[in-house]
Amino acid sequence: MILYSGPLSLFARKVEIALAEKGMRYERVMVEFSQTLGYSPKHPAVVAANPKGQVPVLIDGDMTLYDSTVIMEYLEDAYPMPALFPKLPKARARCRLLELEADEVMLNPVRKLMHRSEPPNAFTEQKELEAAKAELEIARKYQTVAANLGDREFLCGDLSVADIATFMNIHHGLRLGAPLFTKTENVGLWYARLKARPSFAKVVVEMAEADVLLSNLIPGRTA
């Protein structure tokens, strides 16, 4: 099994966490990335496997997959234990929906902070005005996560893809200066619990190390 990943790719890192939680052995190929060129020139194996030319790409024998959600659903079907999806249909559908919301709804305001890891340019000041509004939206997203979590340890009963996706989107925002959990204590506790798990901790440490090499660090902010 081979995973093509990226140092600051939250979607590739989602898959890394899932593989670790499932105890899977695999070879990781870390695709070269810079803040000025991105993934250009793109890795030929990634381009060959993914029409969008993006990580993650997973190769498992004669099966080649891209898109983190598709990969994680395949891993659950092919290697079901330990499970990262609930068993019952309604609970499983809710889990899928929470993952979708993390990747496609929560990520929208986080995108408006991404310039903070890039070299400053003539548009930085305008982007910061947009980022200030995005931070307010991110704080509102925390409220949604808090309601979904309630007093549970995880979003869907046991640890699931919903936790992994939501954590990675929140973590991606925090490393870019998103608000902390001042009004959502249960989210802060949930985040700390996940961050302490070896699979999540490894990703957090490696992304911090990559930021030192690749990003403009935000003074005084640690995720």
Image (cartoon, rainbow, N blue to C red):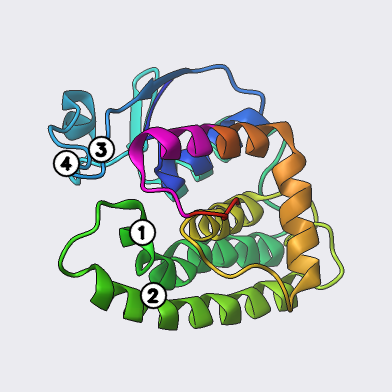
Dots 1 and 2: beta carbons under 8 Å?
yes
Can you identify the residue that label 4 sits on?
A: 37
The answer to which of 140 and 64 lies nearer the viewer is 140
Tag 1: amino acid:
Arg
Can you identify the residue that label 1 sits on?
A: 116
Quadrant in which the N terminus is drawn: top left
In the displayed structure, 134 sits above or below 74; it is below
Can you identify the residue that label 3 sits on?
A: 34
The circle on residue 44 is: none
Q: Residue 77's spot in the image, x, y percent?
A: 56, 38
The kind of secondary structure element at disc 3 is: loop
The kind of secondary structure element at disc 2 is: helix
Dots 3 and 4: beta carbons under 8 Å?
yes
The circle on residue 131 is: 2
Closer to the chain start, of discs 1 and 2, is 1
The part of the chain drawn in magenta is 206-218
Q: Residue 67's spot in the image, x, y percent?
A: 36, 46
Closer to the chain start, of discs 3 and 1, is 3
In front: label 3 or label 1 = 1
Residue at 57% across, 55% down: 221
Q: Residue 87's spot in the image, x, y percent?
A: 72, 52
Tag 2: amino acid:
Ala
Q: Is residue 2 magenta?
A: no
Closer to the chain start, of discs 4 and 2, is 4
